[in-house]
Image (cartoon, rainbow, N blue to C red):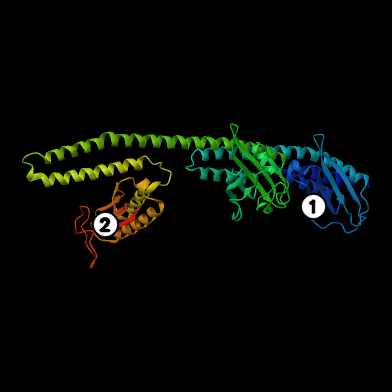
Amino acid sequence: MTAQPAPRLTRLLEAVLEVGTDLGLRGTLQHLVDGAAELTGADRAALAMLDPSRDGLAEIRTPGPEPVAATAPRLRVPIHVRDEAFGELRLAGRAGAGPFTAEDEQLLRVLAAQAGISIGNARLYETARQRERWIEGAAAVTTALLTEESADDALTTVAERARLLADASAGVILHPTAEGGMGIVTASTLDDPGGIVGATIAPGSPVLEQLLGGEPVFLTDSATDARMTTHVRHRFGPSMMLPLQANGRLIGTLALPRRRGERQYTDLERRLATQFASQAALALVLADARRGRERLAVYEDRDRIARDLHDLVVQRLFATGMMLESTQRRDGAEDVRDILARAADELRSTVQEVRTAIFALQQPPADPPTGLRGRVLRETASAAARLGFAPSAHFRGAVDTRVPDRVAGHLLTTLRRALTDATARAAVSRVEVTVDATGAAADGGRDGVRLTVFDDGEREEGGEREEHAGHPADGTTVTWWSPL
């Protein structure tokens, strides 16, 4: 009889050691409930946390069914971590062994006291590990943003990295809308993101007022929270909505929702995510400033090239053309008059091409072409890849201001078809495109715009030849005209 307590003390020591072997909080708590059940012979053990938001855990249980009998013996022992009430260890059921004894309670209190120390250490480890992950993630985002080429890529990077760090089901970026609300512009999800991008928070929403004021919003359940107005809210449960704010300016909002039924975000996760959003917002501002400086450098370089072309090349070509024309009028120039005339025509054509190049250089490189002139140049540039050389383009008159969009669309369709036909012909070495908005119809009627596309390729059998605007008859010329 006197040797009976020794095995229980041994089991207590084993249970204490087992609880302290796991660095993670969940593993530590699982060892605690398993050890308590084994130490007392209980059928069921559970640890209920007093503050689930503190660690994101509500209850840890031993495996197995609940005791069937309503009168099954029960035992409760509090758990404290550094003088803070952490939770309650609950045991139930002792099949055929009678009620729990005072010795059982004493052993559990010893186990609970030692477990409190292990829980505190596990908390410190979890906190340090989470801080390290978020800090590394924020540094990786900053590095990525400063090397991204476009603003869309930058937003996607922030949404994707935040989703992974927060263990969320989605990472969403919202931007303020012109109507005063907020709309989702980027979404990174584990599932199909269909229907998420484009969803909006209506103006006047309490959530929106907090976000616009720079305050984070934490939701227990997005699907049932009356403050949420987006049509995709039913997909999500716990959620964080964090303002992306830098230098007092609200860039947007980072939302990190979890699925319905998943664990709530802890206080630590909320703090770390808020800090991440602040650093990501600053990185977005820096990245945008870097792209702005690069665009400015490109613009300045293009302006310099355009000025050089205009001030040096065009003026010299024009002066040379004047010299040739004056030479034509001199006595004794009859023998070379035709040659001089062709040379003057070539110089005028070259001046037009250089001016077209100057106009193209003055267009923002990242923007789509504006006006008919730019759209024609885009079509010729696209054809250059198929032809192996760049078609020349000439413009006469104010094509950008005189030609309405409706007519410009028909002209571009004809141009596109003519360039496609030219690429299909053999031995094409020259393609010339001319858009003339200065002329009238052949019968002298209302003003119009004329498109001429010439190529020197081999003509198809049975095709017509036309000599037009100085083009030789052994090529193909397509003409199109429309009234303005």
Residue at mark 1 = 62
Q: Which residue sits at x=19%, y=58%?
A: 473
**Which amino acid is tagged 2?**
Asp
Return the disc, 1 or 2, that comes first in the chain's sequence: 1
Circle 2 sits in a helix, a strand or a loop, which is it?
Answer: loop
For residue 91, side relative to residue 442 (left or right): right
Question: Residue 394: horizontal and vertical position, in percent?
Answer: 28, 48
Disc 1 marks a residue whose amino acid type is Thr
Q: Residue 449 in the image: state x and y as whole percent.
A: 32, 52
* Badge number at residue 443: 2
Mark 1 residue crowding within 10 angstroms, few (<14) / some (14–19) / many (20+): many
What residue do we see at 54% from left, 38% from top?
284
- Residue at the image position 9 percent from the left and 39 percent from the top: 330
Residue 26 place in picture, x, y as percent: 73, 46
Q: Is residue 136 above or below residue 38?
A: above
Q: Nearer the viewer, residue 63 or 103?
A: 63
Left/right placement of residue 281 relative to residue 308 reads right
